Amino acid sequence: MTTQDTRSAKLTIEDKTYEFPILSGTAGPDVIDIRRLYSDAGVFTFDPGYTSTGSCASSITYIDGDKGELMYRGYPIEQLAEKSHFLEVCYLLLYGELPKAAELEDFEHRVTSHTMLHDQMNWFFRGFRRDAHPMAVVCGLTGAMAAFYHDSTDINDPWQREVATIRLIAKMPTIVAHAYKYSIGQPFIYPRNELDYASNFLSMCFAVPTEDYRVDPILSRAIDRIFTLHADHEQNASTSTVRLASSSGANPFACIGAGVACLWGPAHGGANEACLLMLREIGTKDRIPEFIQRAKDKDDPFRLMGFGHRVYKNFDPRAKVMKQSADEVLGLLGIEDNPTLQVAKELERIALEDEYFIEKKLYPNVDFYSGIILEAIGFPTSMFTPIFALARTVGWISQWKEMLEDPNLRIARPRQLYTGATRRDYVDIENR
């Protein structure tokens, strides 16, 4: 909910003054409503990266980067990660309130009943090379769902929107797990309805037809927390991409596929993969001081991945929860002697004590710990971003649904500051 403030902002251009209303949300900074700026004053704002621009009004997720706070629908992420589980968080993000017992049971049943893929979709995987990045496969299969589920592509039908929502949340783990199995040459494992969401995903990734597979509850809980902590994160690049695609009226599967494609970037969803690659580059604990010095050198292009965050100017609240899970997983698996994990833990210790990192507030972030956990469980780095996409799907859908229900919905059309050539006449090729 937004309210118009009695205050206003005034902009003076030459000898004319223009007045714009100030809007207040329920939390966070006030905003200046400049929707009439161009029509009234004939100018645009210039904001590369949109870092000072509010693109929408949303009631889903709130971040206070200075305080290190993240809330889903008003609930602190720490409480949800400790007391809730992923499908309950999905319900909260989608419908705005925590479910009652009967509501949660019904929601879990609907998701569980839709985890299988249309059998013909399995042939799509075989169209990719075996060495294709799993993210390329996930991106392709997500968009391809529109070719199989025609009865849930009409965005103007509330029931079809609901069916598409359930299908995407239910089938994304199957798509991601199949992409992994295909990459390592193992047969696909079908989902099992008796397992919870996270355990089912681990089963589809690591079970084989020749023997029974038991999901360890500590690993399942760690994966469930990863899903919960990555479920939504306000108007980040991939979420904004989903909203941008949605504004054109595109079907839900195309919109979520666009979000998957954006997430693939190393500065976004690929950050935890880049973090593990950096740890491997460091190699051994005795080389850490060398890389610490390089990170402090402004003239050195090397950057420590997994530290600091564009939004959080304090400790990433998700990282605190993830660190606990990392300790539990490493303790369970007894792999503290893994060289990469040794480097990670020593780098974490040094960074938390080094004055440079403390002053710059370069704390380990969620990508640092999630990469450690996923590698310890047995996932290759190429699977990190697909797992992120799996978790973020519910956030994308929540934002998509909210946008379609917004009475102020318009197709997105960012403007530009043109710096190219002015009008010039065509010259025939023989005269050039």
Image (spheres, grey):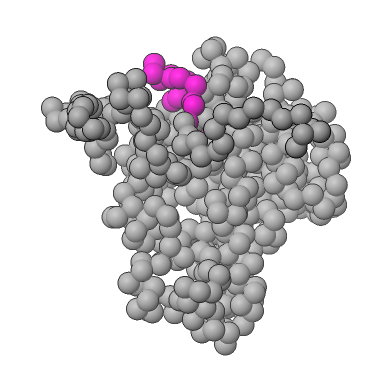
In this rendering, is residue 85 above or below 5? below
In this rendering, is residue 428 above or below 156? below
User: Can residue 325 be spotted in the picture?
Assistant: no
- Residue located farthest toward the front when viewing the structure as drawn: 431
Q: Quadrant of the C terminus?
A: top right
Residue nearer the viewer, 228 or 294: 294
In this rendering, is residue 59 above or below 133? above
- Report which quarter residue 376 is drawn in: bottom right
- Report which quarter residue 67 is drawn in: bottom left
Residue at 65% over, 37% down: 172
Q: Is residue 131 left or right of residue 134?
A: right
Q: Is residue 399 magenta?
A: yes
Q: Is residue 414 left or right of residue 352?
A: right
Q: Quadrant of the N terminus?
A: top left
Residue at 36% over, 61% down: 315
Q: Is residue 133 magenta?
A: no
Residue 330 rendering spot, x and y as whole percentages:
56, 69
- Report which quarter residue 66 is drawn in: bottom left
Residue nearer the viewer, 431 or 278: 431
Residue at 73% over, 48% down: 134
User: Can residue 283 be spotted in the picture?
Assistant: yes
